[in-house]
Image (tube, rainbow, N blue to C red):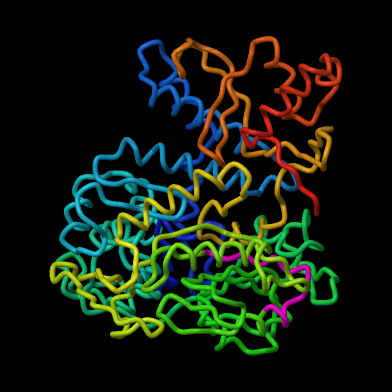
Amino acid sequence: MSEPAELLIVPPLTDFTTSVVAPQGAELLDLGAHFVQRIAEPARLEETAARLDTREADRPQALHALFAAAAAAVLRRQGPGTHDRARLRATGMALRLVGDTDPALALSLDDLELRDGTTESGAAVTTAIAHTKLFTPETELARQCAGERRAVRIVVDGDQQLLAVVGLVQALGVHRTTLCGRFAAQHEQALCALEATRDVRIADWRPDRIVRPEWAGSASPGGAGRPGHAVSPEGAARPGRPVRWATEPQEATPDGPWIGWLDAADTAAVPAAAWRTCEGLTLTVARLDSWEAATGMYGTRADLSAVLDRLREEVPVAFELLVGAPGVDTTTLYGAMHRIAGNAAGSRATGPRPVLAGLRPFRLPRDAGPTWDGVPVRATVRPDYDLARWAEFTAPGTHTPQQRLDTIHALLADLARNTDFFPGRLAGAVTTARQGARAEAPVGLSGGYPLWDSSAQVVRAAEADVDGHGPGTFVAHLRTGAAFRLHPRLARVVSALADGRDEQLARLPEATRTKLLDQLARAGALRRYDT
């Protein structure tokens, strides 16, 4: 009797817009995709909205009811173009809502946080496992697929997966389980010391990832609306060719299309020929004094002008800006933002047009050196953090941790309404960089070509009091996190507008129409796209 094929398991809370490429002879069980499909099921969100939409609901519960209904409406859309940023945000809302009711953890689109402790502590992870049942259906599915005899390999690429991984090891047994992936290789010693994973085997093997066909359709402008079709450097579609997802320089190759999210310094290790097959790129920078002097997470400088010169003009390029790096003051930070936005001296006039993907607090890698871009750094790693990835640090001329957060919150409050920040650190956020709002919903607002942002949904609170004025109809915006009430006489007009129909809008008196459109634009529900 032959041995059953090895089972390659992808635990929950990895990038669900990508898929792992299983080696020949192995069977793939993608529990990450299963988890997202279960949690982001529209009917589940509608049930949540109905449960919270009561007269007894407090304001947070009432808001949750609105946003659950908005997320469900987005996720129920079908057809070309519906795998967009709105869908990512709706999925993130579903994850956040389910995490709000869990005793051990909180979730977002691309992260997990423990309510007590951190995933940098193996003890805290072990404790949290005993208090959450969030991953039980996926664990049971793995148990059924593995049977009694199958060898199992579990891909561990990030700390967010640790709770699910420990649960899988406990359910399947260490005797037949191998851990692999980036995180497992980096933390082999600590994982082997944890009681739950002490006798498990760890292999330094990392599977390739490709963008799921439904998310790869807009990896470049010529591929938009054609799921699964990559676009060649000459612009001709290549049906069925997978788009590779690269988060390390060796994964970016010239032999096929790829999109990536790389640290600025890692671009130096990408083969020159690979830039011609790139379909989308997001770069993480901690300092950007010029395109020729960009600094990555480790304090290493890179010349990004050479990278941008090699990319085709239509390739979407975005920058994730880290706030609070050693020696980087507020003036330098704002200079980097203006350079990315094209408002500073030295901004590029040709080639790809960069956009700002988002802002994130700078964290010093645990294995960083004693200086960062020439700035002396004093770093400490807590001894109880056996799974540490970052070090606490002090450096001259540097924001404190609280100043980093305050700066980010202030910038987000100023920019969120009119800036299409990436919903998360996902391949799908990169491929949807040029989608913007729904092209089928133009609105005749003077001074540009505004579109209805599909992250904004018109939803009704039947009983809950959202804003102190009783039930009503609201625009709930998944991008900005804000909701505002609509006048009863205008609710149908705005609902039609959100569906791409402006007949009712045209019937309004000009003054009323102008006031309404201005209100929607200020709220970010209407956005202007000039390209």
Assign the N terminus to one quadrant of the image: bottom left
Q: Nearer the viewer, residue 103 or 201?
A: 103
Q: Quadrant of residue 89?
A: top right
Q: Is residue 310 left or right of residue 364?
A: right
Q: Position of residue 47 (x, y in %)?
A: 47, 25
Tell me where the magenta segment starts and ends, as one range.
Answer: 308-320
Q: Position of residue 267 (x, y in %)?
A: 57, 82
Is residue 319 one of those drawn in magenta? yes
Q: Residue at x 56, y 29 (%)?
A: 476
Q: Quadrant of residue 318?
A: bottom right
Q: Is residue 215 left or right of residue 334?
A: right
Q: Position of residue 314 (x, y in %)?
A: 78, 68
47, above or below 226, in the image: above
Q: Nearer the viewer, residue 111 or 146?
A: 111
Q: Nearer the viewer, residue 201 or 283?
A: 283
Is residue 82 one of those drawn in magenta? no
State the count of labels: 0
Q: Residue at x 18, y 72 (%)?
A: 198
Q: Residue at x 40, y 55 (%)?
A: 111
Q: Position of residue 430 (x, y in %)?
A: 62, 61
